[in-house]
Image (cartoon, helix red, strand yellow):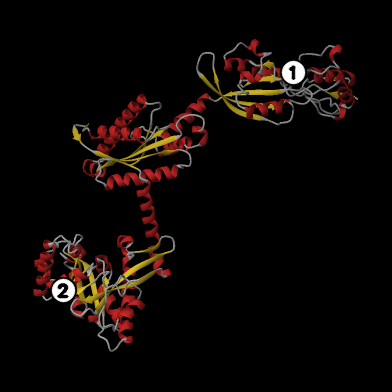
Amino acid sequence: MIGTLSGCGESFPARQRANALRERVVSGTSEGPTPATELGRAVVTESEILAPSGAEFAEFAEGAEAVEVAGLVPDEPVEPDASPVPCTPSPPSYRSVFTAAPLAMAVVDREGTVTGANAALADLLGRDQDTLTGAVAADLVDLASDARTWHAYRELLRGRRARLRCTRRLKHPEGHALWVRVTVAPLPPDDGGVLVSVADISDHRALQARLRHLRMHDPVTRLPNRTLFFERLTGALEAESYAESGTGRIGLCYLDLDGFKAVNDTLGHRVGDQLLAAVADRLTRCAQDAGRARAGIPLVARLGGDEFALLVEDSTGTEQLADLAESLLDAIQEPFDLSGRRLSVSASIGVVERHAAGTTPTALMQAADTTLYWAKADGKARWTLFDPERNASRVTRQALVSSLRPAIDRGEFALEYQPLVGMDDDRVHGVEALIRWHHPRFGTLTPNRFISLAEEDGSIVPLGRWVLRTACRQARDWQTRYPDEPPIFVSVNVAVRQVWDSDLVADVADTLEETGLPPHLLQLELTESAVMGSSGRPLQALKALSDMGVRIAIDDFGTGYSNLAYLSRLPVSVLKLDGSFVRGFQIEDRTAQPGAADEVIVEAMVQLAHRLGLTVTAECVETSAQATRLRRIGCDTGQGWLYSRPVPPDRISELLGTPGVQAGVGNP
């Protein structure tokens, strides 16, 4: 059979075609036949492609008519007018591709020794190409620097792993750093060994470093930003960073500029940014000075706005942080010259220093933020050291605030009552309702622990309604149960925010209608500071309540404004003298004379109140001697432990109908 050899444009007899096929397959080139002595030997190169064996060639040659390989086609009948097929160039050998490839590569045997390397690898590593053959591949690209990579590489040499890829930082012979990505892949089993390719990624790493710097630094001050600060803080608190060396402690100065908002608002954000940059420079200099005195320069970062932080790793104690805080305050208090303007600012600093073990970034920052708040609250332009006891009080306060409103719904509040006893007849004329919070965690809490919190968050309004309704209902119950006794009034404390944030008049009217308590048996107590100077809505509310028949009392009288002229225009019916005046009557030494000044003041206030048509109640009556002197002065009613401590409603019931209240009858 006569066939056609594709790519030569000529016709050959079958034998000539077979010879040509044998020559092209064995040699892999188009440069002519391979010598007969080499026909049965495999061609070994540094590529992944191996030449076929002699047996495979013989089998292939015999069936050449039916197989299309390397430019050969099956036999076709030769047409007299057939046009010759254009000649197609043969592909280059894999050795030439390996040699000319721009990617740096080396072939490594099973022992890890380089058996061949191309010129690109020599150029990349800055070495002579001849010196690479026989070198240890792991040393060339630093594969033994960490145990994990070294183990994976050894496994790959043994044929137990498919591929390895890692990034390495090498030192070029010229002195600069060289970042490379190393890929190790196995060669076919017959070859043995692996192919190592090395790509230069130095430019990519430089770009990454630049982008990271931009992402991790503040554009205004060029200081590390919050992200980098927390990254550094997290690393400093990891156990391995301080377990074997250092002090095992960490410190933080959390700084905030005082009045920076005013600079932005009056001079503009451009000047504000200039001020921030100038502050950053001074903080950096302070950190450098501190670093020269001790090992390690503190990290200075801008956390946002006008807040900065200085992180001190391996701190030596609170004294080191205190010295640093003092230097920061001194540096910032120096005037700044900005664009022809001379500005003066101050700063408040929260200082935290503690053991790193057991501390988290969140806990450290919370402590620093709390301490900074204390520095602001204490007057600004100062540094304050974190106090665990003070912080525990703050935590407790926050816990109470968060549970105030739910506690109302859960029924955790209760009322106790303290008798108001007539000085002339020793009978119970009324009671003051005092709220107690039976907290599931902190136990029973008195009003001074939570009323101010309730006023701050507004929960005093629903809480006050509950107190008013409960007290009025209890007073009505006593009136119903003891119809033959003179009815007693109930006195309820009212916060000034209740007057502003709610319709107190409507609340009182609805409660009186709901409970059936007569208005004259309800007394509302407001502190002197809340009542004095009242105008507008509060004053209108007080007058409306007084017109309704409700009694208005001023609590703790004598400790506030004491505007007596204004007192005459208020719809007040009762003054409650502050207990500090009554305690002045106490005689600790029997040979000493009573406090004459306190007695004169109390007597003057009682006479003034009576001239204005007001009744007077003395608080904190604890001894019979005090009661006797108050009675002689003309005080109308007394309240205190002499008669009874605040007690539950059933204990008050025991006092009702009693001809005279003996000292301590209502006490436990």
Task: Say above or below: 191 vs 356.
Answer: above
Most distant residue in the bottom direction: 484
2 or 1: mark nearer the eye: 2
State the image quarter where residue 642 is shown: bottom left
Give the residue type that dot 2 points to: Arg
Q: CA distance from mark 2 to mark 1?
A: 121 Å
Residue 223, percent across and down?
A: 37, 33
Q: Which mark is residue 631?
A: 2
Q: Secondary structure at mark 2?
A: helix
> For mark 1, what is the residue?
45
User: Where's residue 123, x and y in %?
Assistant: 58, 15
Q: Quadrant of the C terminus?
A: bottom left
Disc 2 packing (10 Å; few <14; some 14–19; many ≥20) = some
Residue 625 visible (yes or no): yes
Residue sitting at 11 percent across and 67 percent down? 566
Residue 516 locus on image (x, y percent)? 30, 84
Q: What is the secondary structure assignment of the residue under circle 1? A: loop
Q: Quadrant of the N terminus?
A: top right
Q: Nearer the viewer, residue 121 or 173?
A: 173
Residue 14 in the image, given as x and y percentages of width and height: 89, 21
In the image shown, does 41 or 286 lie closer to the viewer?
A: 286
Residue 346 horizontal side relative to residue 206, left or right: left
Nearest to N terminus: mark 2 or mark 1: 1
Q: Which amino acid type corresponds to the residue marked 1 in the rendered image?
A: Thr
